[in-house]
């Protein structure tokens, strides 16, 4: 894989939780459950087809991210890049890369509501062909940010960082308009945080931004069944490991929803960067993972 393709895949993996959060909270009907089931594939396709005036590019891209992850549950493999994000099924299946973007557009053009379901059945048939002669074989899926993380070991560096950030919070908040009465860890306080981030154009070493990363993560933890997590970078880790240097989630504090199969990881630092990256139409309240209902 070329360096450019590798960076493109890393950016795509980093964006996956954001894309699926937007799919659930912005584009899908209320109550749609994204549990990686066949039923959820059909629900996403119905929502795409039923969108008045057709699905916009943001909806289509978010759907492609989720559909690709669900299909990998059938065929294993990993994300790759061929000018766009593609699913690379487990090599043992001998299948061509699956272009999920065009698959979404095929679903829109077809209007049948069965394109995603039939693609999943095609992949399962390929798996069944191998299992007919090797019943113990199963496709291998490389980890992605949407996979359930399961129990995670305590990390001393994260514990120290959280303790320091909690201690620094009163002075951090009191230095901002409204102080602690505004920055009260409510979802509505994220609007004030947005304003400050956009005004300050803070850099990574700015104490304000460090506090903002912690504050945003704490709001997510309080409202979205989430916990903080940190995977220290290990240069000796195997490729695909959480701790490998190429994993875009290693070496940063982030939050995850450990008790949910459809739980999402959330990178506060990246989301604050996205306020600048995506402009005034981008809002933190729209990308905070949903809480359990």
Image (cartoon, rainbow, N blue to C red):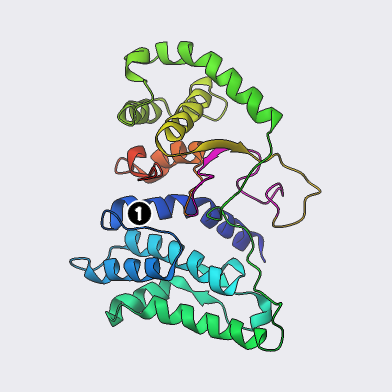
* Residue drawn at the location 28% of the way across and 70% of the way down: 46
Furthest toward the right, the residue is: 236
Residue 187 screen position, x and y as percent: 33, 31
Q: Is residue 252 left or right of residue 268?
A: right
* Residue drawn at the location 63% of the way across and 66% of the way down: 141
Residue 19 screen position, x and y as percent: 42, 54
The residue singled out by tag 1 in the image is: 24
Query: Does residue 84 appear anywhere in the picture?
Result: no
Residue 6 screen position, x and y as percent: 63, 60
Q: How many marks?
A: 1
* Residue drawn at the location 47% of the way across and 54% of the way down: 262
Q: Which residues are magenta?
A: 241-261
In the rendered image, the vertical position of residue 212 relative to residue 236, given as above or below: above
Residue 201 screen position, x and y as percent: 43, 29
Q: Is residue 154 left or right of residue 100?
A: right
Q: Quadrant of the C terminus?
A: top left
Secondary structure mostly taken by the magenta-highlighted segment of the chain: loop
In the rendered image, the vertical position of residue 196 relative to residue 10, given as above or below: above
Q: Quadrant of the N terminus?
A: bottom right
Residue 140: quarter of image = bottom right
- 247 drawn magenta: yes
- 168 drawn magenta: no
Furthest toward the left, the residue is: 52
Helix, strand or loop at label 1? It is helix
Residue 216: quarter of image = top left
Instruction: Rate crowding at label 1 as few (under 14), some (14 to 19) or many (20 or more) other CA atoms within 10 Å.
Output: many
Query: Does residue 48 appear anywhere in the picture?
Result: yes
The residue nearer to you, when weighing 37 against 271, is 37
């Amino acid at each position: 894989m070329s360096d450019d393709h590798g960076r493109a895949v890393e950016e795509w993996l980093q964006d996956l939780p954001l894309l699926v959060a937007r799919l659930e909270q912005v584009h899908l009907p209320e109550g749609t459950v994204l549990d990686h089931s066949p039923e959820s594939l059909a629900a996403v396709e119905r929502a795409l087809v039923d969108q008045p005036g057709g699905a916009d590019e943001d909806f289509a891209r978010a759907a492609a991210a989720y559909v690709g992850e669900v299909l990998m549950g059938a065929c294993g493999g990993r994300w790759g890049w061929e000018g766009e994000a593609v699913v690379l099924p487990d090599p043992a299946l001998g299948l061509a890369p699956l272009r999920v973007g065009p698959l979404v557009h095929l679903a829109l053009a077809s209007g049948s509501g069965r394109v995603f379901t039939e693609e999943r059945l095609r992949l399962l048939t390929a798996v069944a062909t191998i299992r007919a002669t090797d019943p113990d074989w199963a496709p291998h899926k490389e980890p992605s940010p949407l996979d359930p993380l399961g129990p995670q070991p305590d990390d001393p560096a994260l514990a120290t960082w959280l303790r320091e950030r909690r201690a620094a919070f009163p002075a951090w908040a009191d230095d901002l308009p409204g102080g602690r009465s505004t920055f009260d860890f409510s979802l509505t306080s994220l609007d004030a945080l947005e304003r400050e981030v956009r005004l300050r154009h803070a850099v990574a070493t700015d104490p304000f931004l460090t506090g903002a990363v912690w504050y945003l993560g704490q709001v997510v933890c309080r409202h979205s069944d989430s916990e903080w997590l940190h995977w220290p970078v290990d240069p000796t880790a195997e490729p695909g490991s959480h701790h490998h240097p190429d994993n875009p989630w290693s070496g940063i504090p982030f939050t995850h929803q450990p008790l949910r199969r459809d739980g999402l990881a959330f990178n506060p630092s990246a989301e604050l960067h996205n306020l600048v990256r995506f402009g005034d139409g981008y809002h933190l309240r729209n990308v905070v993972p949903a809480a359990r209902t």
